[in-house]
Image (cartoon, helix red, strand yellow):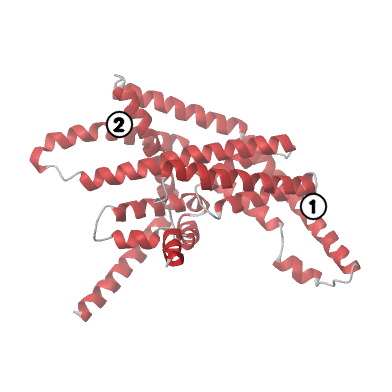
């Protein structure tokens, strides 16, 4: 029995390594299809709503496709120019940040706090955060270059989703059980839909706040806030750092503090009040799992993998919850708040 378990462990590990290697080799093809799948899942509720109001499935898909194209045109027209302009000005911002860092070190040195400037700049360079934001936007832009492929895949997935119940009925008694599959799809649909709307509201509020403060590229930082709201706990910090640094370079420390405060208030309200109200406390991930998934999926799928990391891990968790045999794994991936509250109660 021990030999059989050992063989099973090594075979499972080998299969896992092969699958991850295949994913990395097919990143350029896999990432657009993953984005298309997420968009299709988010678009399923409005499509079903249209069908229930006596609109044909084909016409419903056409209307949703028009909506997606309009949203893509809006993002491309208003955010695309900001991405290009920010990427061009990125070296200037980094140079200004380094200059402010040098000024700060000189001020500390004048007040009796001597620091090794070369060692400090080598290990603590604030320009790296803005460089990472530029690389992330560049990677996301490369994926969005396949917009036609993504939209076409979404159309096919929606049409297949509308036709799937009819195909199941045609199978009759030979049709597979849809209990677990239906529960899984409903859970994923609810999670992505609620998370998408809350993230959109977060991005809009951040963009409005930065526009009021006069920070450059408010729509760009609103888009980043929208994307990183899918990464709980640490996503808000990652999204806030480049905007705060830009406010520091462009206007001054007071505005930078106001930007940081705005990010904190918006993400606290959306993440701790609005989102749990509609999603429930039971849907979530451990902070450690969020961080590890961010590192793992970012390594496996590139910059876009960081944005997809938590939704992908969340889908795995929801799939594990549909079976009694794997529910214990879902509990391990879940949030640690209930366990800590139970321990403190004891």
Vertically, is 136 above or below 51?
below
Q: Position of residue 193 (x, y in %)?
A: 42, 39
Residue at left offset 48%, top offset 58%: 290
Pick whichever, 10 or 257, lies toward us: 257
Q: Secondary structure at mark 1?
A: helix
Mark toward the start of the polypeptide (2 vs 1): 1
Residue at left offset 45%, top offset 26%: 67
Identify the mark at residue 96; answer none if there is no mark.
1
Badge 2 is on which residue? 159
Q: Does residue 25 appear anywhere in the picture? A: yes
Residue at left offset 50%, top offset 41%: 274
Residue at left offset 80%, top offset 72%: 116
The answer to which quarter of the image holds residue 203 is top right
Relative horizontal placement of residue 69, taking residue 268 as reference (left or right): left
Q: Residues within 10 Å of mark 1 (few under 14, many from 20)?
A: some
Quadrant, the C terminus: bottom left
């Amino acid at each position: 029995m021990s030999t059989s378990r050992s063989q099973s462990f090594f075979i499972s590990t080998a299969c896992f390594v092969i699958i991850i290697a295949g994913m990395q080799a097919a990143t350029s093809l896999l990432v657009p299809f993953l984005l298309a799948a997420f968009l299709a899942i988010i678009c399923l509720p409005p499509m079903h709503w249209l069908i229930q109001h006596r609109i044909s499935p084909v016409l419903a898909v056409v209307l949703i496709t028009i909506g997606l194209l309009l949203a893509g045109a809006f993002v491309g027209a208003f955010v695309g120019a900001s991405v290009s302009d920010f990427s061009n000005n990125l070296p200037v911002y980094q140079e200004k940040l380094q200059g402010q860092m040098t000024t700060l070190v000189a001020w500390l040195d004048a007040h009796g706090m001597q620091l090794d400037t070369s060692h400090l700049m080598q290990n603590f360079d604030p320009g790296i955060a803005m460089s990472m934001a530029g690389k992330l936007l560049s990677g996301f832009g490369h994926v969005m270059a396949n917009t036609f492929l993504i939209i076409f895949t979404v159309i096919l997935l929606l049409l297949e989703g509308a036709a799937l119940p009819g195909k199941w009925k045609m199978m009759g008694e030979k049709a597979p059980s849809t209990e677990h599959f239906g529960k899984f799809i409903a859970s994923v649909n609810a999670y992505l839909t609620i998370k998408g709307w809350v993230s959109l509201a977060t991005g809009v509020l951040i963009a409005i706040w930065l526009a009021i403060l006069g920070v450059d590229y408010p729509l760009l930082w609103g888009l980043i806030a929208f994307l990183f709201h899918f990464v709980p706990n640490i996503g808000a910090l990652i999204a806030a750092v480049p905007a705060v640094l830009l406010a520091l370079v462009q206007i001054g420390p007071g505005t930078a503090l106001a930007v940081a405060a705005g990010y904190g208030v918006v993400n606290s309200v959306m993440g701790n009040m609005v989102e749990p109200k509609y999603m429930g406390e039971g849907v979530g991930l451990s902070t450690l799992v969020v961080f590890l998934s961010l590192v793992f999926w970012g390594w496996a799928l590139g910059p876009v993998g960081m944005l997809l990391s938590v939704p992908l891990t969340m889908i795995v968790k929801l799939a594990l919850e549909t079976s009694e045999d794997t529910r214990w794994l879902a509990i391990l991936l879940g949030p640690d708040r209930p366990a800590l509250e139970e321990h403190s109660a004891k």
